[in-house]
Amino acid sequence: MKTSTRFIPAALLAIGGLVLLAKPAAIAMPLRHDLSSLPAVLDGRSSRELTISAEEVKVSGTTAHLLRAYGDRLNPEFTLYVGYHAAQSQSNQMHSPRNCLPGAGWQVLTSGAVRAGDQMVNRYLIEYKGTKALVLYWYQGRGRVTADEFQVKLHLFADASRTGRTEEALVRLVIPVRSSATDGKTATLPTEPEAERLGVTMATALIPSIHALLPAPPATTSATVQTAALQPSRTP
């Protein structure tokens, strides 16, 4: 009797969970450079640091994190979040925005993926009490940039088994979007297509900069992104 393929993903995830449980504690891999080394100016947009509450940090389980707002009155503003896990375990894995956003009250209007340079990243349009935002996010670590949640888990389990390394970063861009062409409160915000172009430009610039901060990939993993100097893409 043939086993239904719909059970394969669940079975693989279960096996992967057992792999993490059976392995000794994962190797904690420190960053090569602090997250604050990321460009403070992106495409002419200056930034300011934002704080994350101690409770949020505890819940996320990150080893290091960064939250910044980029932009001013003349440029659409967006926020950048990077949450880094030096090691993951069965009880401390990255939290997917796919689950966290609805949990925080945001309604997902559309979801999919978009290309940023040579990589694919997740694209979500979300809304909360009339406020809309475009979210781009991806996972980056051990030489890979991955959007697909299932592939992230497969890579995690395989690398934990082969190398004992599980470090990874979640990178998220949030861009407020114009809610209505006639809404004076959001008239200065970008439209959805404009927000996507901005997000793709920023993601394309950030991926190599983040790669330069992360630990060098394991010898058994081929790097899929190129290291770049930590320089802003354009200064004012």
Image: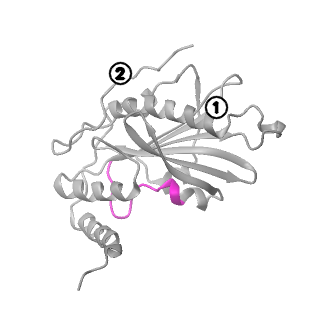
Q: Which residue is mark 1?
A: 77
Label 1, residues with CA under 10 Å away: few <14, some 14-19, many ≥20: many
Please report whichever mark, 1 or 2, sits nearer to the chain's N-terminal start: 1
Residue furthest out toward the top: 236
Q: Main secondary structure of the magenta part?
A: loop
Q: Amino acid at mark 2?
A: Ala
Report which residue position mark 2 lands on.
229
Instruction: Identify the residue at horizontal 43%, vertical 49% (top origin).
Output: 62
- Is residue 93 in view? no
| Amino acid type of the residue that numbered disc 1 sits on in the rendered structure | Glu
Q: Nearer the viewer, residue 157 or 222?
A: 222
Q: Is residue 203 left or right of residue 26?
A: right
List x then y, in percent, for residue 20. Answer: 27, 63
- Residue 18 placement (x, y as % from top left): 26, 70
**Quadrant placement of the N terminus:** bottom left
Element class at badge 1: loop
Which quarter of the rendered picture does the C terminus lie within? top right
Residue under the image location 18 percent in, 51 percent down: 163
Residue drawn 67% across the image and 25% down it: 72
Q: Write down the region rendered in magenta.
A: 86-99
Spatial separation of the CA atoms under disc 1 and disc 2: 24 Å
Residue 186 visible at all? yes
- Coordinates of residue 112 in the picture (x, y in percent): 50, 51
114 in the magenta segment: no
Query: Which residue in the rendered view is the most extreme toward the front?
Result: 1
Q: Secondary structure at mark 2?
A: loop
